[in-house]
Amino acid sequence: MRASKETWLYEISSKHKLIDLNFKEIWRYRDLLVLFVKRDITTVYKQTILGPLWFFIQPLFTSVIFTLVFNNIANIPTGDIPPFLFNLTGITAWNYFKVCLTGTSNTFRSNQNIFGKVYFPRFIMPLSVVISNLVKFGIQLLILVVFYVYYLSQGFLISPNSNILLFPVYVLMMAFLGLGIGMIISALTTKYRDLTMLVAFAVSLLMYISAVPFPMSEIQEKQPQYAWLLEYNPVAQIIEGFRFMLVDTGVFTWSGFIYALSFTIITFLLGLIIFNRTEKTFIDTV
């Protein structure tokens, strides 16, 4: 008697391609992705008094402090752009990159209980962090627009330039660069837990060499020996380019843009490779 051949709907295997990003499978689990996104949005400030108001408070207070310290006390010029608007623009871009990085840098350890019990595409977890923080970025971008219109009404000569067409590209660069670095760190923290404590400290230092609280041109003019720290820092190129297209101030070069874009793509692909390799064995080491 010939055995009947069974056709399986899904087949889970430990063998994967080097770069395995199965869009069809991610789409199949889209309901789970939406669930994780909703969870990330609603639980962050669930038991706080001010709740979602923290989305507004954090960038505003940071911009005020930067304006007082770097512009009023240290006298760092921002050209014809109001210092507060200059700082708010940089902080808006930096915050999205930062939360994408820190939110995905502990994916394996923070979700080990879920990963050990049920199968779903592991990439959905860091992807949900990037998408949920896109909502926060949109809210902070709305704050930026409000102050943008306010300063326009006060007679300041500010306007976006033709690079505004690159806005979606810059958002994707912030997201995927943070996602790529975060996935690499997440894979490493399964073996080296010290990295968890190092990330917050390193990200704080990274902000100061990413042209967030000051113009890149200021360093190139007054401290040219340190200018390479910004010029070869893809995050600084993204922040400076983001600010340039919105308020038409700062340093923008196509070579810097292509460098940051190439670095982002390579970092994301490298992060994806390491993430895919780690997801097979991380449960044994966490």
Image: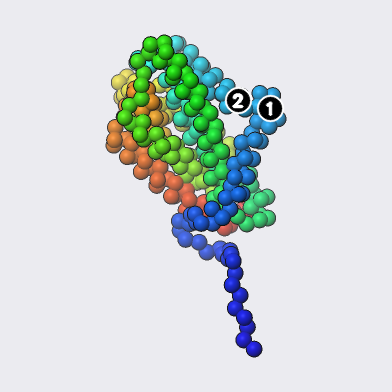
Circle 2: is it few (<14), some (14-19), or many (20+) Cα within 10 Å?
Answer: some
Residue at position x 60%, y 55% in the image = 120
Circle 1: is it few (<14), some (14-19), or many (20+) Cα within 10 Å?
Answer: few
Q: Quadrant of the N terminus?
A: bottom right
Residue at position x 44%, y 46% in the image = 268
Residue 92 appears in view: yes
Q: Quadrant of residue 258?
A: top left
Query: Where residue 213 sits in the image (x, y, percent)?
Result: 44, 22
Query: Where residue 260 sits in the image (x, y, percent)?
Result: 36, 38
Under circle 2, the secondary element is: helix
The tag earlier along the polypeptide, 1 or 2, is 1
Image position of 196 with respect to 82: above or below: below
What amino acid does circle 1 point to? Thr
Give the colour scheme of this rendering: rainbow
Which disc, if any, is residue 54? 2
Image position of 40 with respect to 23: above or below: above
Residue at position x 39%, y 30% in the image = 242
Residue at position x 54%, y 57% in the image = 25
Query: Where residue 231 sits in the image (x, y, percent)?
Result: 34, 32
Under circle 1, the secondary element is: loop
Which residue is under mark 1?
Answer: 48
Q: Is residue 193 left or right of residue 66?
A: right
Q: Residue furthest bottom?
A: 1
The reply to whether dot 1 and dot 2 touch (C-beta < 8 Å) is yes
Q: Quadrant of residue 90?
A: top left
